[in-house]
Image (cartoon, coloured by chain):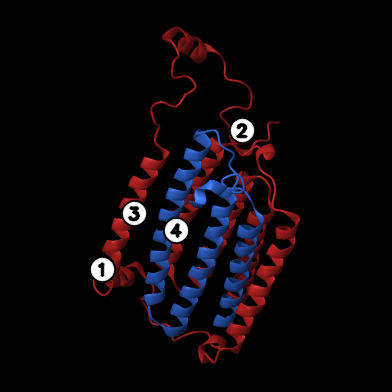
Chain colours: A blue, B red
Amino acid sequence: MAIGWYLTVSVLIFCIGVTGVLVRRNPLVILLCLELMLNAANLALVAFARMHGGEAGQIFALIVMVVAACEVTVGLGLIVAISRRGLAVDVDELRELDG
Amino acid sequence: MSAVVFFIAAIVALGGAVAVVTLRNPFYAVLALVCHLVALAALFLLLRAEFVAAAQVVVYAGAVMVLYVFVVAYVGGAPGTEELRAGPAMRFFGPLMALALAVELMIALLGSALSGITSKGAPYIPGFGTPRQIGKLFLTDYLFVFETASLLLLVAAIGAVVLARRRRGLDEPGAGMSVDDLRRLVAEPRAKDTGTMAEGAGTPS
């Protein structure tokens, strides 16, 4: 398959993730949609690594995975802290978080 | 053959992504994301990224998703607690914005003068993308990145523990329970549909 096909799939997954972040109101699902966007970027990076025949893109993809794991850990910790205080798990109810 | 595998994996990946966005129950959204991640790992294999595919399945579909399942079960994935509460304007303009972004990215992609996009990629050299090759790069050219990643993981782990720890002074249900109460609670038979996957999904049968 030509590399362009992989990039097309990556674009579509990224845009589905954007839709989810804009439309959903549950922070858990928003985190899931962020994962979708990061994975779309990973697919593009690996496709470009294949196109150029170098492994730098794959290294980049692995580092993106590490960053995503960190983001998930902190995000889920926040959600647990929110629910433990008995607040609604809903981004519209949590407006005071913006500082 | 590779075209067939590509289209199957791409359709499963896109279907999983759509399911993550549309399913109302967060528990099922997590399961859809697992499907999506496994299909994406198949795409990575087609792109000769063996180690990235393995890491995707083990780290993402394995470890990170287990964390998600635990938090969904803890917070409660009951359908009543979750709804598409975006205002009508956002529900209309959100997908529209995403569509505009898709069109823009496709124009950028197809309009780019990259000659490699229509090719099948660089000639395959044996050893490309194997753990040996990736490990060698991580310990030579990308050593700084590697060490920074470990530091970042440490910071995130400490941050999560600090954020989610129990604080004193908050009313904890069961904190003031006497030994007799606890004994009675343990002796009681478990209620039907508790402690199961169905409870996490919020659909008691």
Q: Which residue position holds label 3?
A: B153
Q: Circle 1 marks a residue in which chain?
A: B
| Discs 2 and 1 carry the same chain letter | yes
Q: Which-is-in-front pick, marks 2 and 1?
A: 1
Q: Which residue position holds label 1?
A: B144
- The x, y position of residue B133, in whole percent, is 32, 72
Q: Determine the CA span between mark 4 and mark 3.
A: 10 Å
Looking at the figure, which quarter contains the N terminus of chain B? bottom right
* Residue A7: mark: none
Q: Secondary structure at mark 2?
A: helix
At label 3, the amino acid type is: Leu
Q: Residue at x 58, y 32 (%)?
A: B196
* Residue A68: mark: 4
| Discs 4 and 1 carry the same chain letter | no
Q: Who comes first in sequence, dot 2 or dot 1? A: 1
Outermost residue to the top: B180
Residue nearer the viewer, B124 or B172: B172
Q: Circle 2 marks a residue in which chain?
A: B
Q: Which-is-in-front pick, marks 4 and 2?
A: 4
Q: Determine the CA span between mark 4 and mark 2.
A: 28 Å
Q: Which residue position holds label 2?
A: B199
